[in-house]
Image (tube, rainbow, N blue to C red):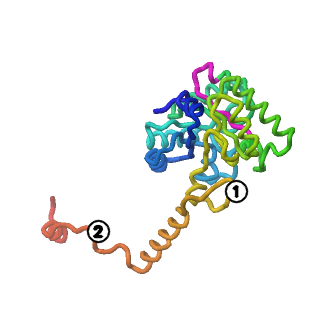
Amino acid sequence: MKSASDFADMKRRGEKIVVLTAYDAPTARLEAAAGVDIILVGDSVGVNVLGYGHEREVTLADMAHHIAAVRRGAPDIYIIGDLPYATYDTSEQALANAKVLTGAGADCIKFEGAQPELVRALKTAGFDVCCHIGLESQHQLEKRRQGKTAEAARKLLEDAAALDAAGQDFIVLELVPSELAERISRDIAAPTIGIGAGADNDGQVLVVNDLAGITEREFKHNHRYGAIGKALGDAVAAYVRDVRAGAFPREEHGFHMAEDEYAAFLRGDAP
């Protein structure tokens, strides 16, 4: 399994880092086989899998449950796990809850916002740390592009530098201008992982449901590489039609008792 230092080496060599979300073992297994470098078990599990209305509803137990599933599916892949909303309000709380996520199988702990003190506390305790700035889904109710003004961009650049100085291992840049992401990627030591942040990050991440066409909504930052949602819908509709028409199951889908056993069954023979 690769380590955080291996990914730092990839950045120095100019090699792109491929990150993708997963929330269950079968998906994680497929991603590992496809060559994904890092799996992110994000709080996006809430709206993409659990039916929640917002990422804020995701609990620590939810995250641990899905991290453990992903670890079972991809035992040799580096996993980043999200600390959910209101689970890292203090360093003590962050440390206690980081232990829960690493205990479930995470290699690295991610949290939102420019909080260098949390980075220092987690790194001192021996955790790998992934920060996240730009759009912060847990803390911003409306999902809008960030860093659009010179002042806002300078603030994000300063935040990234402060987190880097504190020792972060990665940083996610979400929905920030391409020019800003390129500048941050050039200025800091930690690998940058972009989503909706242009091509000049050290790596890229997408939500697997968006990439695969399970999500109905179209996002500007996403590219649909498949149409699994439609394929699954078509398959289920065909199944419904066949069951109602008596076309499924067919003879080959069942099995029969041996003739002597069936005869004994009909006679009511005692065992």
Residue pointed to by mark 1: 220
Name the secondary structure under disc 1: loop
Left/right placement of residue 211 relative to residue 134 reads: left
User: Which residue is more in the foreground, 250 or 4?
Assistant: 4
Badge 2 or badge 1: first in the primary sequence: 1
Label ID, residue 254: 2
Q: Please determine whether, in this image, residue 221 is positioned above or below residue 258.
A: above
Q: Marks 2/1: CA distance?
A: 47 Å
In what quadrant of the picture does the N terminus appear? top left
Kindly tell me whether residue 175 is visible in this rendering.
yes
Magenta stretch, residue numbers:
122-133
User: Which residue is more in the foreground, 269 or 74?
Assistant: 74
Residue at the extreme bottom of the image, as rendered: 245
Q: Please determine whether, in this image, residue 53 is positioned above or below residue 81.
A: below
Corner quadrant of residue 130: top right
Residue in the image at 50% along x and 70% along y = 234
| Residue 170: image location, x then y, percent | 63, 33
